[in-house]
Image (tube, rainbow, N blue to C red):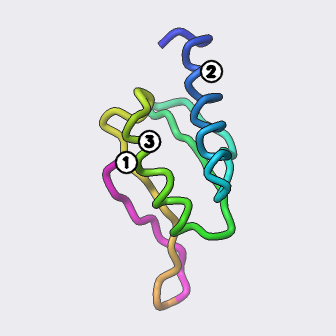
Amino acid sequence: MHAFSQRLRETQLDLDVQSTGVGEFDGLEIGDGQYILSFRAPDVDRLIAELHPLLRRSPLCDGGHLVRMVQSDTGRWERKVAPI
């Protein structure tokens, strides 16, 4: 994907998330065949509920999945993966 086009899509996704009022785009990592978008919010469940439709519409997320860090019963942080 062309870098300028990619940046425009990132910016639009950031604006879309901010317009929901539940969180914000926190950065990205590109490498090893992955394009990782990071978000943050005080209410993660609400953020995810708002993100799903936005991510489904974004060409950046075709075939992607959502990874959420959750604390297990033992207190360990674990990755929880769900398709977009």
Which residue is pictured at 35% across the width and 48% down the height?
A: 84
Question: Dot 1: what SS?
Answer: strand
Residue 10 at x, y percent in the picture: 60, 29
Q: Which residue is mark 2?
A: 7
Above or below 81: residue 78: below
Q: Residues within 10 Å of mark 3 (few under 14, many from 20)?
A: many
Which residue is pictured at 49% across the width and 59% down the height?
A: 48
Q: Residues within 10 Å of mark 2 (few under 14, many from 20)?
A: few
Q: Compute the Cα span from label 2 to label 3.
A: 15 Å
Name the N-terminal-most of marks 1 and 3: 3
Above or below 20: residue 13: above
From the viewer's perspective, tell me whether residue 6 is left or right of residue 11: left
Q: Amino acid at mark 1?
A: His
Name the N-terminal-most of marks 2 and 1: 2
Residue 78 at x, y percent in the picture: 47, 71
Q: Compute the Cα span from label 1 to label 3.
A: 9 Å
Q: Main secondary structure of the magenta part?
A: strand
Above or below 79: residue 58: above
Q: Which residue is mark 1?
A: 65
Above or below 60: residue 23: below
Which of label 1 and label 3 is nearer to you?
3
Q: Amino acid at mark 3?
A: Leu
Q: Which residue is mark 3?
A: 55
Q: Which stretch is magenta? A: 75-84
Q: Quadrant of residue 4?
A: top right
